[in-house]
Amino acid sequence: AQTVTQSQPEMSVQEAETVTLSCTYDTSESNYYLFWYKQPPSRQMILVIRQEAYKQQNATENRFSVNFQKAAKSFSLKISDSQLGDTAMYFCAFMRIQGAQKLVFGQGTRLTINP
Amino acid sequence: EAGVAQSPRYKIIEKRQSVAFWCNPISGHATLYWYQQILGQGPKLLIQFQNNGVVDDSQLPKDRFSAERLKGVDSTLKIQPAKLEDSAVYLCASSLALDGHNEQFFGPGTRLTVL
């Protein structure tokens, strides 16, 4: 079974700083998807960024980028020029491509952006 | 475009009582998911529907939980009887189709407290 581990329960940075959230996963699959989701306080979970394992190029979405290290099974999220609205729980998630295609989430990292 | 709708938003019941949650996915989305998110943890998939058929219910405690999506549109999740450990947020999500290319859109969730 796949597992996803986020080793940082909480992080806190000042506005405009850059922050990196860590995620490692365990799988025997060779092809899969990886995701970062954001869950703001009392608000809905939304997709931040997605990476397909067969693509070597790291995904980027505006201020959000990932560092995908397939051999190390590592998938970190970098947030540049952090904003107060980035304050949220961040979840790393894994999905197989073959077979049961369900999201497996990590425990989450609570990120606080301070003014 | 309307998002995923869930009701009720909050529910408080006593243990051994029954409770039902409702979800209306985004129009046209064939795949519907129910997740359980216990406080301090990432969401865990309970059941996954493709139209009105069950794709994966391997983590659904079938002795007390049931779910249906009779017409392939909206869905209900029921717990009978509830236990203290069922206290959690129940998230519904939907996607156009069953693969990682299609983003899962989440509803606001139902927060269940079992006393």
Image: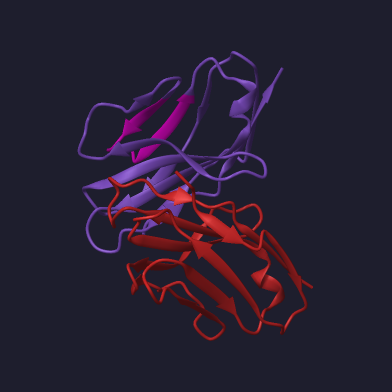
Q: Compared with residue A9, is residue A87 higher up or lower down, i.e. above or below?
A: above
Residue A55 point in image, percent of width and height: 21, 34
Name the residue at 37% across, 57% down: A2
Q: On the image, which quarter does residue A111 sit in? A: top right
Tell me the quadrant of the picture where the N terminus of chain B can be found.
top left
Q: Main secondary structure of the magenta part?
A: strand
Q: Look at the image and give the colour of chain A.
A: purple
Q: Is residue B37 visible?
A: no
Compared with A101, B19 (above or below) is below
Q: Is residue B61 visible?
A: yes
Q: Nearer the viewer, residue B7 or A60?
A: B7
The residue positioned 41% from the left and 20% from the top of the image is A62
Answer with the quarter of the image where residue A15 lies: top right
In this picture, residue A6 sits left or right of residue B55: right
A3 or B3, which lies in front?
B3
A76 within the magenta span = yes
Q: Chain B, which colour?
A: red
Asked if residue A5 is among those painted magenta in the image, a careful observer would answer no
Q: Is residue B74 above or below residue B95?
A: below
Which stretch did the figure color magenta?
A65-78
